[in-house]
Image (tube, rainbow, N blue to C red):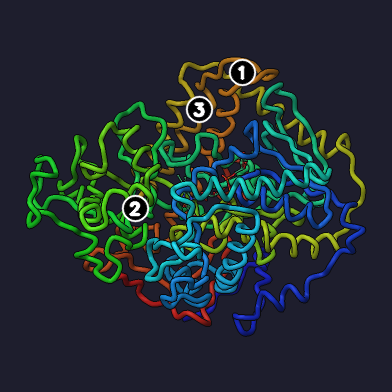
Amino acid sequence: MTTLAASPKLISKAPSGPIESRWTRHVDALKLINPTNKRKFTILVVGTGLAGASAAASLAELGYHVKTFCLQDSPRRAHSIAAQGGINAAKNYRNDGDSVWRLFYDTIKGGDFRAREANVYRLAELSVHIIDQCVAQGVPFAREYGGLLDNRSFGGAQVSRTFYARGQTGQQLLLGAYSAMMRQVEAGRVELYPRREMLDLVLIHNQARGIICRNLVTGQLEAYVGDAVVLCTGGYGNAYFLATYAKNSNATAIWRCYKRGALFADPCFTQIHPTCIPVTGDYQSKLTLMSESLRNDGRVWVPKKKGDTRPPNEIPEDERDYYLERKYPGYGNLAPRDISSRAAKAVCDERRGVGASGKAVYLDFSDTIREKGLDYIKEQYGNLFEMYQHITAEDPYRVPMRIYPAVHYTMGGLWVDYNLMSTIPGLFVLGEANFSDHGANRLGASALMQGLADGYFIIPYTIGDYLADASLPKVKPDQREFRETQAEVEAKLKRLLAIQGDKTLLEFHRELGLLLWDYVGMARNAQGLQQAIEKIRHLRQEFWQNVKIPGSNDMLNKSLEMAGRVADFLELGELMALDALQREESCGAHFREEYQTPDGEALRNDERFSHVAAWEYAGEDQPPELHKEPLVFEFVKPTVRSYK
Ligand SMILES: Cc1cc2nc3c(=O)[nH]c(=O)nc-3n(C[C@H](O)[C@H](O)[C@H](O)COP(=O)(O)OP(=O)(O)OC[C@H]3O[C@@H](n4cnc5c(N)ncnc54)[C@H](O)[C@@H]3O)c2cc1C
């Protein structure tokens, strides 16, 4: 294979040498800041989900002065609270052969060999500390009879390594991180700024030195100065309109930093989760996840016959197709998400889907209920079953759930080096907002692991290395760069309000979402992607001429908030399609119809695409510039990813 030279903008700083000691040796070489000097530095942490709250708590614990910002009225309401199924860690409590190496291997393979080896090994290594940290905070993980923490299995793994708190793992983990952060609020080292939306980054001498926020209650623009900015603003899957994300999740912070010079990596890598409650109508605004953990005990099937409309209990066993078990016997119902999602789409495309729309498959618990009893299911998944029943008015203890894939997670995000710093000095990016660690597909239960590894165990070390060396003259919130950036933000808000067209924001967002779903969704091809780019451009032009945003700027104005986010999605959507178009291979969640094996599996092209694609903004309506960071595999040889 020819070796690609890394773009000079993308120096990963990933260490070399034996993989087991890379992180330790890296930490040993990082510069330190004297404990008494740390309080002189102010760190702006934007976002208080798992990544942000853990980072804020840890940085403040070290002595830094931290300011945190979030959209919600309380940091506890971040989207992380929705995480259901669990968090991976290579503890090997089950004695089933797990190890740091195996978690590393599964994650590299699960991501279809499109992630940095050094990062992924570090993630696996830190996973064991995360569990200890959370237990020490009092996170009530499920326990076995003997008292040890319990585990369950998630897709893409043959060992049981997922720690969980019923179907509320994210909530419990966030309460732990939030409590740690609030301890620091009490100690005076963290200042909370809720109901603030970061709308721009302030650069001074090309360093990140502050942010401009809109106070979402008063509409006032506010400037905040810092020595470094840590973005923890989550993923951008709401670009698709219908998604499992909290409605507030958005791309604005990372997108505006992209426009200030931070490179955006692999924007087309978006995950579509196989087990969500299917869409029921045109006016739906949100989709709901049914956790992957359910696939431990539920069996996925469709009728063998096309167009079979009989209720599930009338379809005899030999007329059912348990297609995941049939096609992927090695992993069965726990095949990874990209593979399971495509398999569901394939059977529905063959007209074997179920339910009124024909766009659903069954997730059936009857065998487990027979074998292990109702109480077992209630104990494991009670709240998920309740949620399903509330939403669909069907009782999943008696009839199989109906599920279909939906947008769930974004592996792409701002490019970061091994220290989690973006291409803008002083701008760090953590959690789902960055692109690191998951490659082209995220295995279940690894987002929480990554966000917490970033916040509790990586940024506390790496930020000091930057601060120790950076030249950081005193700056004031009223100096020229802040005033200019704030004026640009204000002009944009005024421009949006001045349009006063007659099409609603929702209409624009829904149209964009449909375009992305149809052309940049579970299956993509060159023709469709070119069409998507054209159509998104037209939609964007129409938006800036004809959107209707009621109300004014000096008040709580939900429409104005959403308008800025939709405007950003309309730009990001085009970049997602462009990135998907240039990646002429199928890998992980990015499935190009032109590149598949005879039996319909993804066909990678390692020769041409074993790299991170990072895009640089080149100005309004200018094509962005593509930079490449080669991915070198010294420890896990890229092979055809088989789960059979
Ligand atoms: C339904 C569901 C279930 C999931 N279950 C699991 C699971 O079981 N296991 C797993 O590993 N992963 C799971 N995930 C994925 C995981 O929950 C997320 O990837 C993770 O929680 C993201 O954390 P984060 O801290 O990066 O961002 P978030 O939790 O999204 O937090 C973003 C923060 O940024 C703030 N913010 C955003 N924009 C701005 C702005 N412009 N200005 C100021 N503040 C801003 C928000 O207010 C919020 O505080 C699930 C996801 C969903 C949708």
Q: Which residue is mark 2?
A: 294
Q: Is mark 3 within 8 Å of ligand 1?
A: no
Please give the residue where the numbered disc 3 appears in the rendered image: 543
Bin the neighbour count of mark 1 within 10 Å (Cα to Cα): few under 14, some 14-19, many 20 and up.
some
Labels 3 and 1: the sequence-earlier one = 1
Task: Check disc 1 and give the amino acid type.
Answer: Ala
The answer for how far apart the CA atoms under marks 3 and 1 are is 12 Å
- Report whether 75 appears left or right of 160: right
Foreground residue, 162 or 612?
Answer: 162
Q: Is residue 440 visible?
A: no
Quick one: 364 or 475, which is closer to the camera? Answer: 364
Residue 48 pos. (x, y %): 65, 44
Q: Nearer the viewer, residue 412 or 385?
A: 385
Query: Which is nearer the eye, 249 or 93?
Result: 93
Amino acid type shown at disc 3: Phe
Q: Which residue lies at the image location 48% right of the left edge and 73% below the top edge?
A: 92
- Look at 30% across and 56% down and name the residue there: 297
Task: Indicate left or right for 550 with 519 as reference.
Answer: right
| Left or right placement of residue 498 versus residue 149 in this view | right
SS at mark 1 in the image: helix
Quick check: 45 left or right of 393? Answer: right
The disc placed on residue 498 is 1
